[in-house]
Image (spheres, helix red, strand yellow):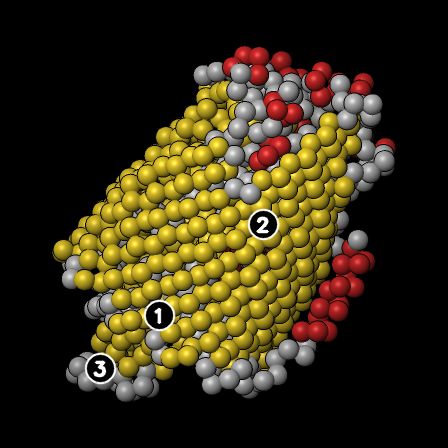
Amino acid sequence: MAVRAARGLVRLALLTLALPAAPVPAVAQIQQGVIHGTVTGPDGRPLSGAMVTLVDGLGTPMARTTADGGVFRFSNVAPGTYAVQAEVPPLTAVAREIRVTGALPVRVDLQLAASTTEGVLVVGDQLEGPASGTRVTLAGDAVRRAPARVRSRGLLDAVATTPGWSTEDNGLLHARGVDDGFLYVIDGVPVYERLDGLFGVAPDPAMVDSVNVVTGYVPPEFGLESGGVIEVRSAGRAADRWMGTLDAGGGSDDGRDVSTVAGGPTGERTALTVGLAGSSSSRYLDPVHPDNFHNDGGTLSGGGQSSWAPSIRTSITAVAGFGRSTFDVPHGEEQEDAGQDQRQRLRSYWQTGSWQRVWSGDVVSQVAGYHRFGSSALDGSPDDTPVRIDANRTLRRWGALASVTVHRGAHVLKIGGEVSRLSLREAFRFIVVDPDEAEEAGLSEAAIAHTAANPFVFAGAATPALASVYVQDTIRTLDRLTVDIGVRADWTRLLDEASQVSPRAGAAYRWPSSGTTLRASVGRFFQPPQPEYLLLASSPEARALSPFVEDAGEGGADVQPERQTALEAGVSQALGRRARLDVAYWRRWVTSVADPNVLFGTTIVFPNNVARGRASGVDVRLEAPRHRGWSGYLSYANASVVQFGPITGGLFLEDEFLEIRDGTAFTPDHDQRHVGAFGVTWDAERFGTQLALTGRYESGTPLSVDDDELDELAGRPGAERVDFARGRVKPRTVLDVALSQRLLAGRRVELALRASLLNLTGRRWAYNFGNPFSGTHFGPGRTLHVGVRAMFR
């Protein structure tokens, strides 16, 4: 497999060399934002020639322009929080905390002085007030420069550096006590499917222009997920000529990767951006055995974006893309000796079209349609033991959404809705090939009964529909006060009919003299069950294997939507002119908790419900934007999660769940009490050098097994990475270092060398161990990656 992937990467690299070859800007996509304004000198007169830079919270540049007659404009700005810097040496000015939340224009007026000043006048959508939720914006360069062992997880690794997010195996993220319940919004269009390594392919870092991570107050326009929102803006080449990048590299574990992005104008009012990326590794997933048995894999993804601006007020965008990955299913020593050869194939493709119309400076409308298709196949082999599994599922989703935003006086009102239809098809089969070994592995009697003479077989199909409407208002009656209110209504027919009306409200007040902002929010959330393998997880066939049927009559019943109430209270404090500290307390109460389980020793995950749960915690974020080349961040999260049985749905082949009865309290697999992350970067633009040191600490996930099973766990490979006295895997601290050095800076070509060393100490660790929900997975040791980046313009 590694050889085939390497050949594919070579062909991909040769193809990309021919891409950058033609000559206006890539125009806006749905939910485009505009930041515009003026630059004046100390005397108040407009200054031509001022260099104006749009940066993220850490000062990473995102776009640059030159003020013409003192006027500047940044188009196609994604939702997020930014700063704008203007400079005509020795005069400078900086405007911080500029919020873009939609398509209405934001105006920034800067007055330069001999020393850095911080002042901003924002008009247009009147959103210069404080934010009532927690938001962190990351530039695309910050995502690309973040060390990543597997390229396809680069975006997920970058999101994990923000507060409130913890990591688990294979790129899985948890947000504020919620198991994978977060919403991707890519170029203004929601993506409800999971994008971790077991389910799909996340956007490649090369194709990311910016990322905006939203927790706390989540506006009603975002729904059907409860943990948070990850808004991704795809890279677009805004230039008067074609530009392109080519990245290629390799490293430990036979790692190889290549990616390219190229784009530019195709006509007077049209533009095109295309990208391809591929990677392969002999440690593709996080293995279930410390010796990393049977773990080759590779990913290939690509896409294109075509933009047309028939007028200055109208933009039309079409996006298409695909992703595919093929990988071995890691296994243990017994399976390796037997010759087990399970493999999984993921395929996906998508198309979206969007239309945005700016009717005036106060009215903007958007319409979009989308189609997404995804499939997953797990292929068993003749030598699988003790269970052979064959599974295949497809998921197709069609949808349309529309909204209109209106600014009137102190109000910014937004009204919108969405409709979609799904097509689900599932086929699943397993047989126990060695009953004695199956019993030793902990399979239940009901599961062991499904031998070759009595296989477990399931096939199902459904075409459920969903619909949503919302209205929200941002009110600015005072310059220092922001009030957000809104309501969302959702209807779903994923098996059972279900609906919920979800009010949400938030407020923030800022004291400019002290740089202090207080905020609070509360909201209701409605999250339909994960559609992947939903039919099987809710079927009578699965019910017959559930250990919860006898005690509560719940196991195997239809998986229900999660319903949640969440609140946040926070404070943001400026520390001097540059640094900012943000602290937030949050709490959630949940019924029908979505907490899927991993099927026995495989990469298949089934949705299920836990009757109820609660979670609370504190998130801290300290940011120091770039100053004299130095920048840094520090994030910390303290969280506690508890859930109460019984469990509904899922597919359980083991007996380990019998003690989770009706009302029984237990600690779920994503309870990570302490999570810390930091990053320090030195950027010497003059020499083309960037050096970054990053680190992450996680205190360890729970074992979630009965005391009488600890002796058996203690005899498993990798048990030395578990603290059995605490009932958790041992804490881990991982330090990474990355270097980027420009080698060539020509007028048309720039070449840079990049190197990263991950897990500097080489200390081995485990994500989880013997957990009945998430299984066992081990983290990597020291990993080296070296690559080059070529930029063509």
Coordinates of residue 543 in the picture (x, y in percent): 61, 22
Sequence order check: which comes first, mark 2 or mark 1?
A: 1
Quote the CA–CA distance across marks 2 and 1.
29 Å
**Contact? badges 3 and 2 (CB < 8 Å):** no
Disc 3 on helix, strand or loop? loop
Residue shown at 67% from the left, 55% from the top: 324
The relative height of residue 790 versus residue 673 in the rendered view (above or below) is below
Q: Could one spot residue 330 in this view of the protein?
A: no
Question: What is the crowding at mark 1: few (fewer than 14 residues within 10 Å), some, or many (at least 20)?
Answer: some
- Marks 2 and 1 close (CB-CB < 8 Å): no
Q: CA distance from mark 3 to mark 1?
A: 35 Å
Q: Does residue 460 appear to the left or right of 433 in the view shown?
A: left
Q: Amino acid at mark 2?
A: Arg
Residue 663 versus residue 268 in the image, above or below: above
Residue 439's label in the rendered image is none
Quarter of the view holding residue 95: bottom left
Q: Secondary structure at mark 1?
A: strand
Q: Residues within 10 Å of mark 2 (few under 14, many from 20)?
A: some
From what the image shows, is residue 792 above or below residue 355?
A: below
Q: Earlier in the sequence, mark 3 or mark 2?
A: 3
Q: Is residue 426 above or below residue 455?
A: below
Q: Give the amino acid at mark 1.
A: Arg
For disc 3, the marked residue is: 41
Disc sitting over residue 396 in the figure:
2
Q: Nearer the viewer, residue 393 or 575?
A: 393
Name the residue carrying label 1: 357
Q: Amino acid at mark 3?
A: Gly
Horizontal relation, residue 107 to residue 371: left or right:
left
